[in-house]
Each structure stands twice: as structure tokens, then as C-alpha cells.
Image: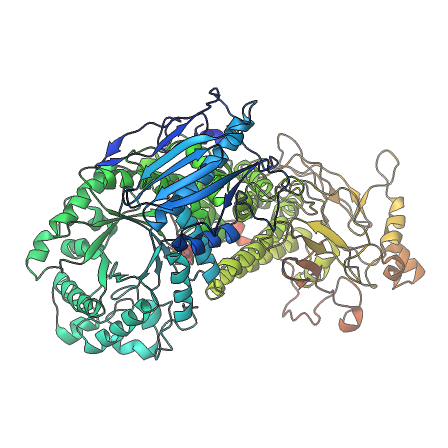
Amino acid sequence: MEPEAMDDGDSNVPSPMHISTPTGPASIAADTTAATGSANGTAASTVEMTDQEPQRSEPRPLLDSDPIRVNLVVDLESAPEHLQQGLQQIVESHNVPYFYRPERPNSAVQYRWHIQFVHSSDIATGAFEVRNALGQVQVRYNRTIDAFRALGQVLTAARAAEAAAANSDSDLALQAPEFTISEQAQFETLALMIDCSRNGVLGVKSVQAMLRNMALMGYTMLQLYTEDTYKVDGEPFFGYLRGGYTQAELRAIDDYAFAMGVEVVPCIQTLGHLGQMLQWPRYAGLRDTSEVILSRLPETYELLEKLIATVSAPLRSKRIHIGMDEAYGVGEGRFRQMFGSQEGTAIFVEHLARVHAICQQHGLRAMIWSDMLFCLAAKNNALYAYYDQTNNPAEALSRVEGIPSDIDLVFWDYYHTLPEIYARKIQQHRELGCENPWMAGGAWTWSRLWCYLPFSFESNRASLTAAKSPAGRVSSFMLTIWGDEGNECDFFSALPVMMYVANHAHTPMSEIAVDFMENSFAAICGGSLVDWMLASRIDEIPQAADADIRSQLPSNMSKWILWEDPMLSFMSPQYASLDLDSHYTHLAGRLLECALAVPAPGAPARYPLNRLLRLPGLLARVLSLKCHLRDRLALPYKAGDRAALLQVAETRLRPLIEAQRELWLYHRARWHRIYKPFGWETLELRYGGLTARLETMYDRIVSYALQQPYSLLRRSRGIGVAAGISRHPALLPTRSRHPSKVLEEPLSSSSAMDTTGSVPLAPGPSMLADEGSGMSVGEAPSWLPDITSTAAAATSSVDNTGEPVATIGLGWPVTTMSIPACGPQPLTTDVMSVVTCGATTAAPAPAVTAPEPQAIPVMTAFPGPSLASQQNGNSDAMSQNSGNNITTINALGVRELGGEGDFWLQPAPLLPPELDPVEGIPAGIGSLGEEDDEVVESIPELEEDLLCIYENSYTSLLLDYGRVTAPSRLG
């Protein structure tokens, strides 16, 4: 099954995930026998299975509703002593449904496989053997980490056996399994590096969750990248307000990893990337530039020794990564003022030698990123200088003392997709005197909100193929997870890339079978690879199916559409010709359905990790409303069609405000679950800025369309301009557990609180799938118009059939007229209408036409007190009708109520007459603080014609936050 088939054929975007047919390595499906090969003198992963079932061209996938039918029983007491703690950590804490847990029995389980671990010095380092005879599984291993990799493969085999049984009439693969699995690691060290310096510092529990996944995948090393996010005695401004790790936390992480055979290595900075520290006056004397520490200064090395000693003390490892990458401007700041102008390579090598000496004093073997050796030699700070195949710094190094022979160079490249490019650069590192350089690839988590899997697979496939080739001969491979640009991304979205790299690192072949990837990701991580591949499409462009991914960087389109200024929207011409509405609407529905899927009653979730898809699902819903928004507003504005302009404000802009609020609430909850709280303020400022701009945009457009002043709009927001009436597919105003179901019955007056009516929403921001949340719509103040009386008074308004018109909101009469679709894409075809209130006459039919007239309930004027209330002199009419609820909420003016995991939204109270100097509604200048009570007469921002900044190169746009928030910030 190819990845394109994962989405019902809705997109023809070719997947760059190079996956072989089921004859590829390590395929553990019950109907598959893997091919065997060799490279680098090692044997490939080998799987032999009996009782084969017939091949099926389109096997039925395992669904959430399919119960788990097999459990793995791990007898901790009989396991080797050095495995017991690690096995207990995984069996008790790892969130996958295949482990037998007596305290949580699963009645649907029919079969149990019992696992026995046997340590054997006869097994080669990095290898293991698994034999399953009628459900009795024996694992023979040498290294501790290989025992856990083997356990992960048994999990994979169990999942594959379930899939085989689901596609046949026999349970033989589950009941009486007989198979063998053998693997040989292709690298001595398989490392994972996680960025903990760009806002997000992973909490200890999150690191432990990563470690469990790493152990089952076979990673041997973890590096936590900490520029200044670790505590140092006597240095209170080092990592000040950054949530740095304490000695106790690092020790706890190291103990947890050691029990599973994973080495924790400190990864710090000792030259560049120290701006967070150098910003404080305490370290002003140590600045060369704003990011680079001043070399050659004795005080610099006193501090660096303190940092190295502190970060290495709680860890068992005798290795350390001392960074030194991207130290642009080294020797060009205060260094030049103090010591004169000197050649950059000489300064770098001198500094490296002094830091290396400190590491030796503490018994540590150091490694560094290698890019500055190449960039300084080329006198070019751009990445091009690093990756230029003709740039070899060997000549520049020959003029200086050279680098110490026991320094390991780490070659990092996350961008190329051809193995030969990596192989040539690896050879250049050897020419520098480093016979065994490291290779580092990347999971594309930076500058985006969700890991982009396709390009991550493609680039890592190329680098791994080169590293394993006879020309490469690399013995250490590292996968990096970076959080540049605020660490907006959920790092756990990189788990499929971790799985892909780990599987690749345990076979000499260059292809990984898709069924093997699906089974291993589901069994080890608890997610559906099909669904997670779908989530990557938030950054894919639907009409670019013929684009060659090898010629472009992966776009972070979802990020810059989310953060770009909604009124100016100067990036929108880049995608003006694309149907992003349908693209993101479809993604939102699919992803939210996957995230909120309910397992069989009483059974554990088959894909518990799929709940994390809620973040890209909510993001896609926001994007479906935000894309093309300015175009939809500019067209009726320029045509002078106020009714159509109001239509767009109520059906897209108002729902967008609510949708982005829900995204913010979930993102906030997810952040505080996996990261320390420090750093969230950066992202919250972005959400707050977007909210403020959307609110201003809405106020100005509605004020212009209705010819009403700001103060009235703010008062009337709580009344409910279009409460729950939009049927735009991306807006789900009243939701049940199924994310696409909209409640059609009137809201009940029953309440979950004393004075509020409750409307069910999808689960709240907490990660627990069974938690719910609600939207409290509250009751109207007594001084608002009487719904019943207003509705009764409306009977004098009849349509052409002689029947009273329908009412919405608080019962104000509704009349229907055609509204044209505007913008590059047609609006939803759901029935809509336009509201007229009291004696107000509906706006004339607009001159602009559309292929199919659309309609929507909107208000062309805000009502005063109802006619019946005026006649009866009843200013407290609402007190007689307290069961009618206000059914819209303000995205800003809300109160949050309820406990952890649930949130309840309630409209901010309207201003009562006794606090308003002007009686009644509408009101003029009151206690709201307006300097002027003016009607918006024009919207100049919508008059400007937008230009395509980057012509048609939208597929390669990888933009940061500062470049899309406002044109004045474009670089």
C-alpha cells in the first residue's frame, strides 16, 4: 500500500517516503517472508514465519473498533536483573494496549504470548534473536538496548498477526504462532537529540515517555540540547526564567534511561548560540557579539568549566557535545577591539583547543557540530558554504594547529535527498583528520506546528543510505528534533520519523516496507501511520501534485497562514489559485474524527496516540476559515455590498475567532502537559495578537456594514448576532462526541451550573480522551428585549405566503434574500438568510451575482426594546422568560469556569442601564471608555490590491513568524 492511498485518493501528492513492497526487510506480517541481504559485513533483519495466509492485494486495516486480541506477558521476576527495572517502566507506563496488566484486564483478549529474556555473549553486539513457538517467545540478546529493541519487534509481530487474522478466516497466526526474528544494528551509536532551548523544555515525564519509545525502537543515546536550560550553582542569571533542568531532574532522567540501556549525553553550547545568557548585564563582559561568547578571555573559560562540570556531574556518560555551531561573527565583535583582527579559523581552533582541555580534565570525550570549520574557511556564513561540495577546509586547517584528534565531528544535513551528496561530504570530514565522523539528520519539527513527515523520511533515507554505504562507513547516526521559531511544534509528532530512522538503522537495505512501518508504529507508539501521514498535509499544497520534492524545501504553509495578519493578508496571493478551503476543511474533519474516535466499549484504544491529532485537526479548521478570508471580504467591499460583507463576517470571521480560540486552549493545555511552563508566554503573545487583530477586523467590518458605532457592537456582542446558525462545515457551534455532528434541537435550559445552560462540545483541552467540555451560554439580563414579546410582535411581518417570518437569536424576525458568494471559492451551499429587525427594510439585492445564490441569517440593524415591551412598559420582560439563553459568546469577553480538563465559556455581562449614562440600547459613549463613538465609514485596508511577493514559488516558502505578521517586518 502506497502512502497516497492513505486518504481515499483525495490528493495525488506523491509521498517521498520510499517504502518497498512486502519483500523488504524486517517485515513481520504473518503472510510475509523478508528478504535477506548484507552490507558492511552485517546481516540484514530476517523474519521467518510459518502458517502463511494467502496474499491479499488490499488487506483490511485494523480500525479503532477492532478489539485487541493478543497480550504480551512479561514475567518481571524471571527476567535478568539488569532488565527488570526497565521492563517494569515499559510494561506499567508505556501507553500501548498489548501489554498484559492484571490490574486492567481486557475481556476481548483471546491469546497471550509469554516472553522470556536470555542474555547471551554468543550474540553479536547490536544483534538479537527472537523465537516464538506456540506463544512462548524467547529473546536472546547481548546489549541491554537490544533486548528492548527485540521487545518492540515482538510487539510489532503481535500487531502483524492481528492484521493477518483480520484478513483471513483463521486465528492460527495468533493462536499458534511460529516465527523467528533476527536483526543486526548498522551503527554502534543511534542517538536522538531533542531541542530544549527554544522556549520548550521537556518535562521529566515527557523525557521518560520519549525514552520508552526510544528503547523499544533501539536508540542507544539521548542528547538534550540545553544552551542555558540547566541550573548552575552561583550563576542565577544563567537560564534565568527559562525552566532549566536541576541536578536532581537530570539524575532522574539518567537513571530512567540507564535501566533501558540508553546513554544520556549532555549537549550544550560553548561558543555560539549563547544569546539567552549574554543578554543579561551579568555577562556583558563576556560578549564577543550578542550570540557569541568572547574567546581568549580567562573569565570565559572559568565560566565554561563551571558549565561543563555542572551539566556532566549527574550523568553516567563520559561523552559531551560542546556545540560550537553557527557561531557567526566569532572574532568580529569585542574580540577584534581587544585582540585585533585575526583569521576566523585560527580563533575557532584556538578556542576549541582550550575547551577540549577542560573536557579532558573532567574525563570527557567531546564532539562538536562541524559547520563552522567549513563556513570560516569559505568566509561565508550561509549554509551554502557548509554544503558546497567544492569547499574543503583542510587547507585552512593546515595553516593552524588543527583540531584535536579525539574530537568527534558531527556532520549535520537535513536538506538533501540524494545519498551521494552526503557521501562526498562525509569523505571531506575524513580529510580533516576525523576518521569516524557522525552523521546527523533531522525530523522537520522546526518553524511549524506539526512535524512534516514526507520530507523527513526522504532526507533521512538519503543520509542513512550514505552513512551505511561502503563509501560512508559511518558508525554513529543522530536524529535531531529542533524547535526553532518558538517551539510551536509538538515534539511527539516526530515519533514516526524516529520509528523510520530506527528501522532503517537495523537493516543494510535502503527501503522500509510500508506494512512493517505501519505495524511497528501502531504497536510501539500506539498511533496509526495512515492518520499521521494525513496530518502532514496541513503543509502540503493540493494542486502541486506534479512538484518534485527533491527540488524544494518543505513549506510551513500552515504556520504562515495561521499567523499572517488577517486584514492585510499580504501572503494570500501566493495561494490565490488554490482551493485551500476544501483542502483544510477535509483535513479538519478527518483529523478530528481520528483524534476523537471511541474504542469498543470496555476495550482499550487501539490507537491511543491518535488523540494528539487534535492539534493539527484544530489548526486545519482554523485555516479553512482563514484562507482566502481577505479576498472574500474585499470583493463585496469594493462592490459596495454591505449585506454580503456582513455575511462573510458572520459566517467566516466570527467562526474563525471561536475556532482559533479553541486551538489556543488546546495548544495551551498540550504545552503544559509536555513542557515546563516557561516559554509558553512567547506563543501566547502570538495567539493574543491574532485574537486582537481578528476582533478589530470583525468590529470594523460589522460597524461599516451595519453603520453602527463600536460601543453598540461591543454591547450587543453577547446578544447573539448569529448564534449557532452558521452551517459552514468548519464551524461546529454545538458539538457532540462526533466532531461533525451539529445539534439541531433548541438549547435546553437545564444547567450544569446554577445560572447557565450547557451545550456539549468536543473534549476539552486536556489530553484525556474521555474528558468533555462545555460552552455555557448563560441567561440574558433582564433589561434586554423580551424574546417572547418580540416574537409575538413579529407576527405582523409576513412573507409572500401570508405566514409569519422565522425568528432567530432572541426572536427577532428573519427574512430571506439572496447573497452572492464572494472570494475565489464559493461559500457553503447550506441554507442561509438575512435578518431584518422591526420596521427595518432588508437591503436591496446586491448587484454582484454568483453561480448559485447563497443566503445566511445576519442582522442588518440592532433592535431597540421590543414593540410589546414598549407598549406594556415592561423593562424587565426577560425576567419572565429566563429559560431562553444567549447563544453566542465573545471570543475575548468570556469567563473560564470548571475544573481541569473542562472549560466553560460564558458571555461577558452586558452593561446594565444603571451603569450607562445613556438609557436603552443602542447607547452612546458610556463607561466603556471610548473616546469617540464613530461609525466606520471606510476600510482602506480592503481597498489595497495585493501583490504576489514571491511570484508562484509558494511551494518552497519556509517563512518565520516575523515575516508574515506585518509587511513592515519583512526582511
In percent of the image, x 20 and y 50: which residue is there?
437
Q: Is residue 668 above or below residue 462?
A: below
Residue 153, by quadrant, is: top left
Describe residue 370's horizontal placement relative to residue 433 as left or right: right
> 314 or 71: nearer the eye?
71
> 213 or 714: nearer the eye?
213
Can residue 516 be seen here? The reply is yes
Q: How many marks?
A: 0
Q: Position of residue 96 (x, y in %)?
A: 52, 45
Q: Position of residue 595 (x, y in %)?
A: 57, 44
> 165 or 352: nearer the eye?
165
Furthest-front residue in this view: 78
Can residue 380 be seen here? The reply is no
Q: Quadrant of the N terminus?
A: top left
Q: Position of residue 481 (x, y in %)?
A: 37, 52
> 43 or 543: nearer the eye?
43
Furthest-top residue in this view: 54
Q: Position of residue 288 (x, y in %)?
A: 23, 71
Describe residue 375's horizontal placement relative to residue 665 as left or right: left
Describe residue 386's horizontal placement relative to residue 22 as left or right: left
Residue 166, by quadrant, is: top right
